[in-house]
Amino acid sequence: MTAILFVCLGNICRSPLAEGILRHRIEAAGLSAAVSVDSAGTASWHTGKSPDPRSIAVAARNGIDLTSQRARQVAPADFTRFDMVLAMDADNLTELRARSPVGSRTQLRRFSVVTSRTPTMAAPTGSTMSSACWTRAALPWCPSFRQVADRKAIQTGELHT
C-alpha cells in the first residue's frame, strides 16, 4: 500500500482539503485498498479541531466531506509510516526536512498545484493555492492530484509531484 501525507501549518485548511480531494479521487478510481491518505500540521495549536469551516464549505460544494477529519501534528512515526509527505508550502517543507530522522526513506516534497494555466488565489486562511484545484471540475488536469491518483503510478510506485 502507498501511504501519502499532506502537511500544512495548522492542519485545518490546506492539508485537510488536499486529503479530502485525493481520498475522493482514490475512492472514485477504486484504489482505496492500494492508497492511504492523511493530513497533519507542523504546529500543534489546532490539534483535535475540525477543518476550517471555509475548507469544509469548499469541499462540500464539490461533493467532498471533510467533517470527520481532525487536526493533528506531524509525529516522528510519520517519517516511517508514509511513503510520501507533501508539504503545502516551502516553509512547511523546510520544517519537515528539519524533523526528518537521519536515514528516513520517506519522500519529502512540496505539493505543487500551480501550473502555467492556473491562476493562484488565497486559501481560506490566506495561503496561496491554485484556484483550479479548489474545484472538482479542474481536478483532472491539476498535476499533483492527477499523478498521485493515477492507477499505474500507484501500482508501480512511480509517484511524482
Image (cartoon, helix red, strand yellow):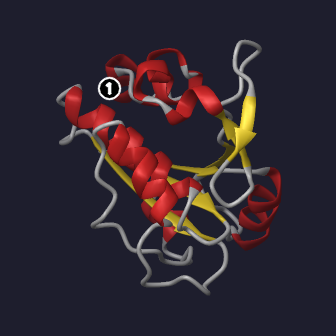
**Category of crowding for the residue at label 1, using alpha-carbon neighbours closer than 10 angstroms: few (below 14), some (14–19), many (at least 20):** some
Residue name at image x 58 percent, y 54 percent? 14
- The quadrant holding residue 30 is top left
Residue name at image x 69 percent, y 67 percent? 100
- The quadrant holding residue 79 is bottom right
The amino acid type, in three-letter code, at marker 1 is Gln
101 vs 136, left or right, is: right
Percent of width and height locating residue 60: 33, 47
Q: Which residue is mark 1?
A: 155
Q: Is residue 161 visible?
A: no
Residue name at image x 39 percent, y 46 percent? 59
The correct choice, above or below, for 66 with respect to 68 in the image is: above
Which one is in front, 54 or 88?
A: 54
Q: How many marks?
A: 1
Percent of width and height locating residue 69: 35, 67
Residue name at image x 27 percent, y 67 percent? 68
Percent of width and height locating residue 73: 55, 78
Where is the N terminus found, in terms of image quarters? top left
Where is the C terminus found, in terms of image quarters? top right
Q: Secondary structure at mark 1?
A: helix
The correct choice, above or below, for 122 with respect to 100 in the image is: above
The correct choice, above or below, for 127 with respect to 34 in the image is: below
Percent of width and height locating residue 43: 66, 79
90 vs 28, left or right, is: right
Q: Is residue 104 visible?
A: yes
Which one is in front, 2 or 26?
A: 26
The correct choice, above or below, for 84 with respect to 91 in the image is: above
